[in-house]
Amino acid sequence: MATDDEPWQEDQPSMDHRRERIRVETERHRIEGYLTLARDGYRSRVSDVLNASERDFITLTEVTVEPFDGGPRELHAYLTLARRHIVFAVAAAETPEG
């Protein structure tokens, strides 16, 4: 349990959640980041989150965004993406390419 002397950090392990690095592509961008998933059971797979009809957006953390038109790579602490813009999604390497 975090105290005032020890602030909670996002990279601390969670008993209920885990993070999986994924790459998604839209028509214009390649996006990589961490998706937070349930440790097990309901919503523990990437496909569960992507197919959830009641959820219009997914949130990724530690995100890189690369435009297909050759623009500069952008880094973001988090990004919320509309599911309807996702063309496909795959597992990505745990360490972002630099």
Image (cartoon, helix red, strand yellow):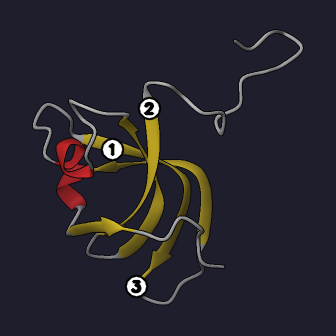
**Where in the figure is residue 21, as x and y percent of width and height?**
45, 58
Up the image or down, 72 lies above or below 80; here it is below
Q: Which mark is residue 17?
A: 2
| Residue at x-position 66% and y-position 33% | 12
Q: Residue flagged by tag 3: what amino acid is it?
A: Phe
Q: Residue flagged by tag 1: what amino acid is it?
A: Ile
Residue 49, picture quadrant: top left
**Where in the figure is residue 2, as x and y percent of width and height?**
74, 14
Q: Which of the two discs, 1 and 3, labels the residue nearer the N terminus? A: 1
Q: Which of the two discs, 1 and 2, labels the residue nearer the N terminus? A: 2
Up the image or down, 63 lies above or below 4; here it is below
Up the image or down, 35 lies above or below 87; here it is above
Q: What element does badge 3 sit on?
A: loop
Residue 64, picture quadrant: bottom right
- Which residue in the protein does label 3 denote? 68
| Residue at x-position 62% and y-position 63% | 75
In this rendered view, identify the residue nearer to me: 14 or 84: 14
Q: CA distance from mark 2 to mark 3?
A: 32 Å
